[in-house]
Amino acid sequence: MDFSLNEEQAKLQKEAREFLEKECPESFVREMEDGDKGFSPELWNKMAEMGWLGLVYPEKYNGKGGSFADLSVVYEEMGRAMLPSPHLSTVVLCGLTILEAGTKEQKADLLSKIVAGDLILSLALTEPESSFDGKAWEAEGVNVRATPDGDDYIIDGTKLFVHDAHIADYLLCVTKTRDSANPEDDITLFLVDASDPGVSCEILETTAGDKQSEVNFNKIRVAKENIVGELHKGWPPLEKVMQKGAVLLCSEMVGAGQRVLEITVDYAKTRIQFDMPIGINQYIQDHCAFLLSEVDAARWLTGQAVWKISEGQPCDMEAAMAKAWTSDSHERACWRGHQVLAGVGYTVDKGVLPLYSRRAKTKQLYLGDSAYHLEKAARQIEKWPGPEKFRGKAVGLWDIPKEEQIPYWEPWKKRWEEKEGKK
Amino acid sequence: MEFGFTEEQEKLRKDVRDFFMNEMPEDFEPGVETMFSLTKEQTEFWMTFQKKTGEKGYLTPGWSEETGGLGLGPIEQGIVEEEWGRTGGRWPNFSGLHIAGPAVQVFGTEEQKKKFLPGIAKGEAVWNQAFTEPEAGSDEANQQLRAVEDGDNYVLNGQKTFITTYVKPDYLYTLARTADTEPKHRGISLFLVPGDAPGVSYRALGSMGFGTQVDIFYDNVKVPKENLLGELNRGFYHAMSAFEFERSGTGGPASAKRSLEEFVEFCKETMRNGKPLMEDPEVRRSVAQMAIDIEVQRLIAWHAVWWFSEREKLGPKPYDLSGFFTKIFSTQHPETMMNIMGLYGQLRTGSKWAKFAGKVERRWQIARSVHPAGTLEVNKIVLAGRGLGLPRVPAKFNKQIAKALGEKK
Ligand SMILES: Cc1cc2nc3c(=O)[nH]c(=O)nc-3n(C[C@H](O)[C@H](O)[C@H](O)COP(=O)(O)OP(=O)(O)OC[C@H]3O[C@@H](n4cnc5c(N)ncnc54)[C@H](O)[C@@H]3O)c2cc1C
């Protein structure tokens, strides 16, 4: 048991923080939010130079062969700096799925390009209807079809809330390719060239001003070589990778939450009202104490899930717990921040909190909100064995009738009464 | 980060669990009975049980072998406590193990250690923490119970209240005023008072569900000078820093987890509208949320244990959220469970219709006592002040208020 970062991770953290303080100040975050692209290709290249795009890929694809825990350290810093980048889409959701399920050729071709910063990918999973039915992140929610046509497939349909689609070179499109009893056995992943004339993409206006799109696949033709993994077998690897993505979102929220805590406490100490720092008031202290608790709990829940993934241990319960808790707790943490920062917490030009707060909402909903992950946890809880029964001998003490039971300290009571009586 | 345990630690866990499982009465329902409702025989059973545990060294695994422990570290201590919590065994000497014993370890003289510690480690002695007074609850520095020097003794006069005790205590770990100072906490000392010293008397206070609280009266109680713990007039500081020692807090979440497992069984077996409760989406979410809350408590507790095990490197922990979360969740969970159980939720131990012997109802009542070791409000103030460095109301305001109150009188 050791809750600290190891030496290399501490170094990685320091490097990442310094890098992002320089490259991704608040002004940059605002600029990206207002721009069309929502990210900076120059910064993307610098991230490639830092090795962040291949951090967890094997060395044969020019990756660094690092652990998932290393990646989580970087994500915490990215959350702290609110870094806008297609890292999660490209490196994690699409890249790791290719690493997990792709053919030899696909891996050789795509992964080193990702590591070099030459390729941006985007996962096209969620759909208009399923996103409303609460099935956005389930195989059951996939209705966009890929229909065989000779050696090719025809994909037709709409995907919604697709992150980074507008800048992607390829979309990893999740499709339904048959109707069996179990929807998880019907899913096929296609790598779709984003420049195909049949693919259209429209950026959505969102709370966080991040770049999510509606993507339309208008009867496009995709060769079967573009299937990632096997026909009908796309769901298991994708689900595994989405779990990692959800945990990395938690890491981001932990980093962001820590920053919100710092901003809030700092303000509570320095803002003067009624001739005193507002932090002297217990209501304000209450907000700060709760904020601290939200961030701390999220940190250890996330840390545990990260550790399990890193060690290759099963972690369905831990990942679900981390995302279920962190989604809402980060949101609550920002809310506490707003109570303390009042005007400065609301006005966008003066304060940085609105930026965090709006991003908190996106991360809460992305890759499964708390209701979704609570359900995942409940499925694990159903598998719990009942609590073990004691194997000792019955000592018979517990059968004594109630009226015969006397509190052991009755005699003292008597003594007290006698004493009182005497007085 | 590394959340796992070593092989030896896992082995210890298994040994401890086996020991408890074998010693525990077969028909024992953890969490049902309280010390308050025990028969004399039952009380004796738990005292014997405590002694047996002491013989194995499992009461004080973190203490050195000379003082009756196993010489293991805080992590091992946390493991043992987790297993205690899980099985629901009773420790009549809770305060001695967790509060007074560690304080003697740190602030005691060699003689005091020799005299008091083995009794605690072997499970023979029972100690109470006697701090709270009618006018000194959250404001622990406002001690009114007086200790006046008299030759080789101190003479104690005053009252303590809300003191938890299951059986007649052998010793009272007592805070008393030894000087009238400003600020108040600089004139307080710690005494180790024999529970049957002439002049000590007890009065029972009935309480909701939990156990036994008593008033303790000190009427010219003579305490020999060698029973002063630590420095004269430094008792408040000693007591506060002793709170930081050896209180791993891993037992609470372990016992909560067990209760939840029982509740899940209930939800799987009980039908409502033709379907098991566990299939109701509302119930599923509540159960999952409780499991996560307990996991939060568990991790926070282990973080504190780990920090303590590294204290030479890390120094004292600036804040501890264990109490904070425990106070919140131990109130919420029984409430949630009772609501799910509907009308059955209100049934007490003893009713033939009660589910798992009325445990949930009992926990609901116990949840009205989240005040020991500082109220939730005081916890938050400590987190804000010590944990986050937020300012406190300057002492001069307290003085002004005190003065104003004085003038009113
Ligand atoms: C089941 C149980 C077991 C106990 N066992 C023991 C024991 O073994 N030994 C022992 O010594 N004591 C014991 N106590 C006493 C316990 O420590 C006190 O009840 C507790 O410290 C609170 O004191 P009080 O009840 O006098 O409340 P008060 O201090 O009068 O507080 C009343 C309310 O005012 C709030 N408050 C007080 N001061 C402030 C402040 N500065 N800012 C904001 N809010 C404030 C409190 O949070 C609370 O809500 C036990 C109590 C219970 C309920």
Image (cartoon, grey):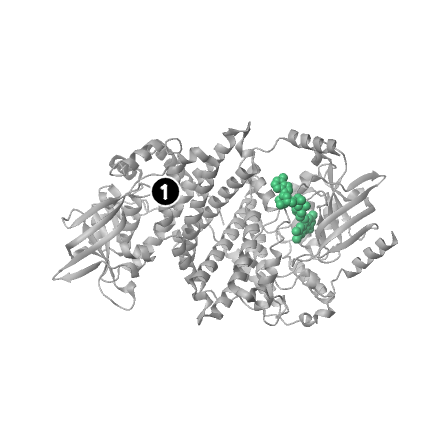
Camera-nearest residue between A137 and B25: A137
Label 1 crowd (10 A; few <14 / some 14-19 / many >=20): many
Whether residue A361 appears in this view of the structure is yes
In this view, the residue in front, A157 or A296, is: A157
- Residue sitting at the far right: A422
Q: Residue at x 58, y 40 (%)?
A: B381
Extreme-top residue of the structure: A275
Left or right position of A199 against A67: left
Residue A97 image position (x, y, % from top left): 28, 53
Q: Quadrant of residue A80?
A: top left
The location of residue B347, given as percent across then percent down, is 60, 66
The answer as to whether callout 1 falls within 8 Å of ligand 1 is: no
The residue furthest left is A150
Could you say which quadrant of the image residue B255 lies in?
A: bottom right
Residue at 37%, 41% in the rendered image: A358
The residue carrying mark 1 is: A359
Question: Which residue appears farthest toward the front when viewing the image?
Answer: B408
The x and y percentages for residue B5 are 50, 54
User: Disc 1 on helix, strand or loop?
Assistant: helix
- Tell me the quarter of the picture where residue A208 sits: top left
In the image, what residue type sits under mark 1? Arg
Q: Nearer the viewer, residue B249 or A412?
A: A412
A58 or A116, which lies in front? Answer: A116
User: Left or right: A65 with respect to B260?
Assistant: left
| Chain hosting mark 1 | A
